[in-house]
Each structure stands twice: as C-alpha cells, then as structure tokens.
Image (cartoon, rainbow, N blue to C red):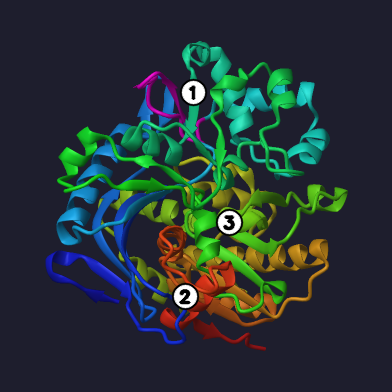
C-alpha cells in the first residue's frame, strides 16, 4: 500500500499480463460501510492494471433520534458529493459511478422528498414486527419463498414495523440505501437485484419480486421499483449534481453488485469456486460459497444459511457471523471507560501473547451481542451463565474474541460444505479482516485448511470491475472468472497454512 500526494491511498497497481483487458479508463466507486464510507477512483488499462486510489473517506455510524436509531443518509450523500468532486478533479475522465453499501436498510420517498432518515437495522423496533410477520407466514414458508436466513432486521420485518409509524402510507417508493443514493444522483428509481435479494421480498426461485407476499403482508406493490442487473445503466447524473461536483460532462451511474458483499465476492481471487469458501470480513463476517443455484433444504434452513443474489446470476450461499463488530464495539467501550484511544495493532499483538487454550470460546452469534453498548459486559455475562472463566484483562478478552470468531468462521465453512455437498480446499478472507493476521491464522488452524487473505478493498474492487465490464473494457472473456483472474494477478493474497 502506498500513499499518494494529499494523503490519498492507492492499493494494488501491479501490472498483469495476458491481455485480459482490451481498453480501459477510470471509474468512481462510492463504497459505504457500517462504520465509514469512501470514494475511490478505480483504474483499469490495456495492460491489465487494476488500481484503486482513495480520494475521500468519511465516518459513518448510527444516530440516535427521538424515533430510534437511524442512519444519516443526508450526511452520507453530502460526503459522497464532495468525494465525487475530488474524484473528478483528480481524474476528469471518470467514465461512470457505482455505489455499494450494507444491505436491508432503506429510505422512504414521496416524489423527490425523503421521508426522514432511514432506520438503522440495529434499531429495537423490529422485535414485535417479526412476530406479526411470522403469524401470517411462518419462517418455514418464508424460507421456501425467499431462501433467506432468519435475521430480525431483514427488510420484510422492518417494513412491517414501519406500519406503526404512519409514514409508510405516505411513501410512493422504498429504495435501499445504494438505490436511494443513485436516485439522488440521477432521478432514476430502480432496485439492483443483488441487494433486493436481501429484503425477503424477492423470490429465490427466479429472482423476481414476490408480489403475492407483498399483497399478503399489506405492502403496496408500487413501493418497489423495477429490478436491474449489475452492469445496467441507471442514468446520467442530474445537471445540478454535474455542476456541484465540477464535471465537464454528464456521467452515468451504473448498477454494480450494490450489496457490498456481492461486490466483494466479485473480487475474491478464487481459481476454483467449487473447492473454495470465502469470508467477507468486516463489521459482519459473511461466510459461504458461490453456487449456481440456491439450496433451500430443511437442513439449510435449520442451519440458518441464506441464499442471496450474486453478480451474473450466481448465488451467495452464506451464513452471517457477528464479525469484527465484536472487537470494534469492545474497543469503543474500553475507550469510553478510560477516556483514551486504544491502538488496535498493539492490542492484537498483546492478544497474540495470550495462549489460545487459556481462554474459552464463546458463541459469537449470540443475539445479545447485536446491539451497540457495553459489549465486554455482555460477553462476561455469557461466560458466567455458562460457568466459564471470564477473561481477566483486555488482551485476554481480545484473544477470546479472535478465537470465538475463528471457531464460528470454521464452523460455518464446514456446515456450508456439508449442506452444498462440496469438498473444500481453501478459504479466502477478504475485507478488513484479511489484515488481522491472528484471526486469519487461527481460522486456518481451526478449519484445517489454508486461508488466503486479501484483497482488503475487495468491495471497491468488485464495484470497479463490474463498471469496467459495463464500459466494454474487457475483451474476449468478460466473465466473472476473467475479472477474478485480474484480481489474483494484481493483488496476490497472503497464505496462512494450518498449524497442527
């Protein structure tokens, strides 16, 4: 990783050979995560260069209002515009813009007006809504229809909760976060298919809106716009946006795998998806396989595995593990208690010195760990309830979190292989977790197979690659496999062998 003038971060940049790219240029990726957002310039050229340059980074997180926990989408949009202005300044020839973010959350609109800031998926309002939805359609039936694992914040439950607020009846569109930003940029209302597949309102059998379920739950069909595929042109930016970001010409917004995991999986450098598992590791750890078709067996439902849409019609068969949220929220609590900033690399280095067998593994997927707040206290309560020793200090707590995540990851990989009838040989870890050497090594150890770590910016790379293909920059072989080959040759992963 190198730093450009002005503090922009560039990743990758190695030149590949073999003619995977016929012509090239630059695109902009708006990549929004649960704790931060960024605007990146992605460059792909005829020699096979795949390069990212970060031109803007900004914080993100929940905002507590009187009505509950929300996202500051208005603020994110303002940050995105400033980032696009910088991208255009650095690279006036930007060919298109792609947007990805976390899943399930949405904004309600009436005409051009957003009806309040979107609710955060960790808001408490969903609990009673789950019961109301399941009273009409038990989870067994929902799984048969949508193939999604049970998560209390899936969009279908959030929309049921929305009824009590009275705003749903005023809205004429519900747009998931990336689609909402695309609308603000272009005026076009669409629903990108990979993200729509996380709502619980898309049929797993054919990837279309489940209008019968909408009717049964009392959701107006007109709330949900037409579905589009990754790579589709959404529209050109509004004249006002063009002026604000200083663009010399209109720029198209192109649909990518707008669910950040869908984009991340595009950039997993798998040479053989049939023998590889992936872990997209950030706030959440998305652990699974890429399949050609869904698995909706009773066993898959009992294991709480989900079937979400992927780029090129692939299926992301995966399980949500709590992820680095456990570590980041614990660090936030320790900083609140001490009033001092903690250095995460130092904390992880101290944790490495704690013997693995000196801490007990806890259930990383326990729902009590979902909400913000004093996470170390809740982990300690879990240990006491199970008559296990509480880690005595922060280093031991950190080691316990890493060991528990590694065990949860390894267990999910084993379960995915069994459910899908696969024999796996490698695990790919992408995203921020790929930088956590202790976590990668312990996942390899506990799974008993090699872990290939990186790229860290897989989501932004996948966003860029889908845009590049939409621009026609891939010649001869525009397949998903060709894009992954380019990633493998320009962003070589680090290998962790399992230790006895």
Q: Camera-side residue: 272 or 409? A: 272
Residue at image mark 2? 487
Q: Check disc 3 and report its element: helix, strand or loop.
A: helix
As drawn, the label of residue 311 is 3
Q: Check disc 1 and report its element: helix, strand or loop.
A: strand
Q: Quadrant of residue 223?
A: top right
Q: Camera-side residue: 473 or 323? A: 473
Q: Where is residue 82 in the image (x, y as percent from the top left)?
A: 20, 46
Residue 375 counted in the magenta span: no
Which residue: 30% across, 59% down?
Answer: 40
Residue at image mark 1? 173
Range of residues picked out in magenta: 107-123
User: How far apart are the two marked residues, 2 and 3, measured between alpha carbons?
Assistant: 16 Å
User: How far apart are the two marked residues, 1 and 3, measured between alpha carbons?
Assistant: 24 Å
Res 424 visible: yes
Q: How crowded is mark 3: few (under 14 residues within 10 Å), some or many (20 or more)?
A: many
Q: Is disc 2 in contact with disc 3, using a CB cutoff of under 8 Å?
A: no
Q: Camera-side residue: 329 or 334? A: 329
Give the mark, 1 or 3, whose residue is nearer the N terminus: 1
Q: Where is residue 84 in the image (x, y as percent from the top left)?
A: 24, 49
Q: Residues within 10 Å of mark 1 (few under 14, many from 20)?
A: many
């Amino acid at each position: 990783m190198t730093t450009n003038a002005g503090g922009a971060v560039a990743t990758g940049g190695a030149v590949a050979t073999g003619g995977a790219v016929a012509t090239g240029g630059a695109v902009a990726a708006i990549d929004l995560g649960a704790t931060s957002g960024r605007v990146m310039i992605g460059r792909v050229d005829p020699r096979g260069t795949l390069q990212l340059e970060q031109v803007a980074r900004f914080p993100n997180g929940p905002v507590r209002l009187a009505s509950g926990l929300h996202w500051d989408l208005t603020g994110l949009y303002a940050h995105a515009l400033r980032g696009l202005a910088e991208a255009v300044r650095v690279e006036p020839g930007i060919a298109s813009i792609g947007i990805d973010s976390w899943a399930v959350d949405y904004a309600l609109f009436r005409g051009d007006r957003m009806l309040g800031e979107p609710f955060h998926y960790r808001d408490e309002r969903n609990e009673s809504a789950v019961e109301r939805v399941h009273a009409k359609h038990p989870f067994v039936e929902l799984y048969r229809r949508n193939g999604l694992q049970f998560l209390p914040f899936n969009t279908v439950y959030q929309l049921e909760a929305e009824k009590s607020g009275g705003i749903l009846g005023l809205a004429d569109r519900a747009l998931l976060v990336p689609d909402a930003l695309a609308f603000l940029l272009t005026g076009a209302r669409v629903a990108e298919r990979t993200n729509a597949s996380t709502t619980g309102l898309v049929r797993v059998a054919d990837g279309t809106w489940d209008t019968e379920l909408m009717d049964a739950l009392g959701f107006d069909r007109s709330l949900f716009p037409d579905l589009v595929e990754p790579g589709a042109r959404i529209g050109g930016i509004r004249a006002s946006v063009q002026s604000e970001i200083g663009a010399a010409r209109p720029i198209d917004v192109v649909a990518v795998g707008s669910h950040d995991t869908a984009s991340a999986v595009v950039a997993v450098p798998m040479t053989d998806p049939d023998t590889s598992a992936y872990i997209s590791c950030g706030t959440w750890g998305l652990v699974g396989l890429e399949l050609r078709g869904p698995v909706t067996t009773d066993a898959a439902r009992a294991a709480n595995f989900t079937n979400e849409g992927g780029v090129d019609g692939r299926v992301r068969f995966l399980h949500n593990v709590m992820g680095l949220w456990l570590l980041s929220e614990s660090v936030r609590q320790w900083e609140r208690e001490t009033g001092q900033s903690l250095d995460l690399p130092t904390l992880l280095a101290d944790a490495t010195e704690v013997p693995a067998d000196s801490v007990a593994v806890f259930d990383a997927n326990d729902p009590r760990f979902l909400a913000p707040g004093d996470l170390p206290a809740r982990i300690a309560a879990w240990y006491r309830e199970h008559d296990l020793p509480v880690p005595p200090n922060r280093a031991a707590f950190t080691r316990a979190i890493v060991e528990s995540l590694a065990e949860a990851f390894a267990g999910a990989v084993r379960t995915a292989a069994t459910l899908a009838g696969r024999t796996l040989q490698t695990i790919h870890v992408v995203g921020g977790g790929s930088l956590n050497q202790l976590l990668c090594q312990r996942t390899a150890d506990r799974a008993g197979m090699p872990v290939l770590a990186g790229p860290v910016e897989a989501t932004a790379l996948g966003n860029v690659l889908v845009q590049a293909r939409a621009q026609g920059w891939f010649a001869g072989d525009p397949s998903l496999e060709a894009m992954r080959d380019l990633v493998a040759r320009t962003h070589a992963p680090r290998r962790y062998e399992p230790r006895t």
